[in-house]
Image (tube, rainbow, N blue to C red):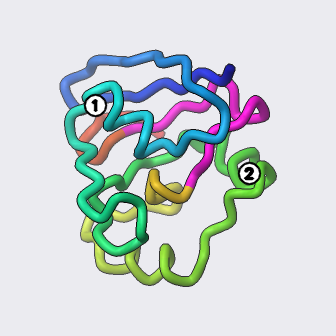
Amino acid sequence: MPKITFLLPNGEQKDIDVAENTSIMETALEHDIPGIVGLCGGCVSCATCHVYVHPDWEDKVIAANNDKCDDEEDLLDTIPEVEHSSRLGCQVKLTNALDGLIVALPGTDTGW
């Protein structure tokens, strides 16, 4: 069972054990992570599940079969606070290979 850590803008950290093949967005909604809304339900059309993937995890996320599709890239281009590590949480499935993944919500002071 993979674990994910959410870093929140208020400085709080939430560590959550999740079922494998659950998306970051689904996990955030299930555990009431503030700032993740998931309005489109994971259809890659709203960006209300935007997160920053910790730099140490960017390549691991891609290696775990979570490539950015063209629709995700296009939608991320519309977000003012986009960074290199930006992802839509609905597009990243959590597997055992991503056990320990760290993501931050926009507005979080990470120092990355």
Viewer-side residue, 86 vs 69:
69
Q: Whole-Å distance between the Cαs marked 2 and 1?
A: 24 Å
Q: Is residue 56 shown to the viewer in this render?
A: no
Camera-side residue of 59 and 63: 63
Circle 1 residues within 10 Å: few <14, some 14–19, many ≥20: some
The image quadrant of residue 21 is top right
Residue at mark 1: 33
Circle nearer the N terminus (2, 1): 1
The three-letter amino acid code for the residue at tag 1 is: Ile
The numbered dot on residue 59 is 2
Which numbered mark, 2 or 1, is in the foreground of this view? Answer: 1
Q: For the N terminus, which image quadrant?
A: top right
Q: Is residue 43 magenta?
A: no
Residue 71 location, x and y as percent? 49, 81
**Number of other residues with Cα within 10 Å of mark 2, as a class: few under 14, some 14 to 19, many 20 or more:** some
Look at 36% across and 35% down and name the residue there: 28
Q: What residue do we see at 19% from left, 25% from top?
A: 10
Q: Secondary structure at mark 2?
A: helix
Residue 33, percent from left and from top: 28, 31
* Magenta-drawn segment: 92-104
